[in-house]
Amino acid sequence: MFRRVAKPPAPPAELPLGGAARGRLLAFTIAATCCLMSVGAGLIFLEARASSQRLYDDSLRETGVLLLQLAQHEMNEHGRTLGVALIEAETDHDPYSFRFQVWTDDMRAAYRTADAPATPFVPLDASGFGWTRIDGAPWRSFALWNRQHTMQLQIVESQKYRQVLPRAIFWRLAIALALLVPLSIALLWWIIARSLGNLRALARMRETLAFERRFTSDAAHELRTPLAAIRANTQVMQGARTPEEFTTASVNLLASVDRSGRLIEQLLALARVDASASLPQRFEVVDLAPLVHAQIAEHERFALRRQVEIGASTEPAPVCGDRELLGVLLRNLVDNAIRYSRPDTRVVISCDTLADGVELAINDEGVGIVPDERARIFERFYRASATHDYGSGLGLSIVKRIADLHGARITVSTGAAQRGSCFTLWFPRPANERPA
């Protein structure tokens, strides 16, 4: 008998993002979008405020030029008193608007609005735009001389008045952001969900193709040996010279056919398990105890032939999973326990509900597994050195794959009688513990 060398496991197919990763992606995308929108709105506001200040300055300068021309015309035409009366009559006394003063070249105030101070807003040698403070508040100033340099007009405008337009722009941008952010979040959620849905479909297709390639390769590799044995035994039967040779060859042929059938069954089970990556979405609450007793009933005749006693110690043990796959897991463990047990020994299966989960244990008194090999027995096509009976090396890899799908931990130790093996699986307890 030869021992197969375990094949290196195929690299797992890349799966689409899970719920947590999808949430992180969405949160990052929304945060980045909100940040960019906020920065964009801030830049727009700064530019709009600067533009509005330029518009206010242009308006202040034009108003100053017109007032200077009017003051000079009225004073030249009607005299200082009448000019003052006309200017006062045409001046808007809105407290949030502008104030102005008219100074002559001898630094005397020719006119000032009623709410303007008696002193110049800015020094008389000033020209153009500047800033001053009135009653502790900032005001924008503009100073302008006439062409003869005999009259100067100083006009100021409250900064509070100049903030009306920027404030309106700010609130309009804030309202726009308040409306756009939820719409953007909804749109991003839809785009990400749609894109990840396409990725999931592609990932499932890629996984299916990978599983098919792996199954074809495994089947071709593993069926080669039993088919060769069948052919050899058939040839022996054809060339048998005595009834004893024919009988021996026929018995060997039947054993080879059984091994081939078992191998095909294991390959098909492995292919089904490999294709069940999305199965947890359809899990239900399943009680392990009835499944254990069903496997005992199924293996009674096999255990009798092997002269092995099989029994169980169970209590209700609800887990969240797939009933059929859990049956496959138990079938492989029970079959192995009986197959590799010595005659006149016992196999005991137990399932118990613990504080933090459910424990399933299969104890046998068989050949056992040396500690150095326990880490490798779940690899595909690996056969432990003590398993003299012919096997496919797939049963325990199927068990491990099903356990992983159910979030179960599996450990291997020496049996309870300090011989044989004990396979122990821990399953998390479902939220709803009522068996399905």
Image (tube, rainbow, N blue to C red):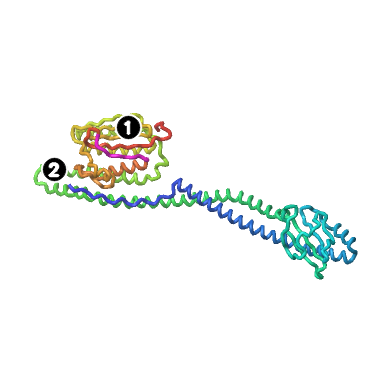
Quadrant of the drawing holding the C terminus: top left
Is residue 107 visible in the rendered image? The answer is yes
Dominant secondary-structure state across the stretch colored magenta: strand
Residue 351: mark in rendering:
1
Say what amino acid the circle numbered 2 marks.
Answer: Thr
410 is within the stretch colored magenta: yes
Q: How far from the left and from the top, in percent, is residue 271? A: 33, 46
Q: How far is mark 2 from mark 1, CA to CA?
A: 43 Å
Q: Which mark is residue 398?
A: none
Q: Does 102 sit left or right of 374 as displayed?
A: right
**Residue 199 percent coordinates (x, y):** 44, 52
Q: Are there few (<14), some (14-19), or many (20+) residues within 10 Å of tag 1?
A: many
Give the percent coordinates (x, y) of residue 406.
Answer: 37, 40
Q: Position of residue 85 (x, y in %)?
A: 88, 58
Secondary element under disc 1, as helix, strand or loop, is strand
* Residue 248: mark: 2
Does the magenta run of residues contain 103?
no
Mark 2 or mark 1, whichever is nearer to me: 1
The part of the chain drawn in magenta is: 406-415
Q: For the residue labelled by badge 2, is the local secondary structure a helix, a strand or a loop? A: helix
Mark 2, Cα crowd under 10 Å, few <14 / some 14-19 / many 20+, is some
Q: Quarter-wise, where is residue 244 in the image?
A: top left
Amino acid type at image mark 1: Cys
* Residue 378, above or below 146: above
Visible residue check, residue 265? no
Residue at 40% x, 36% y is: 284
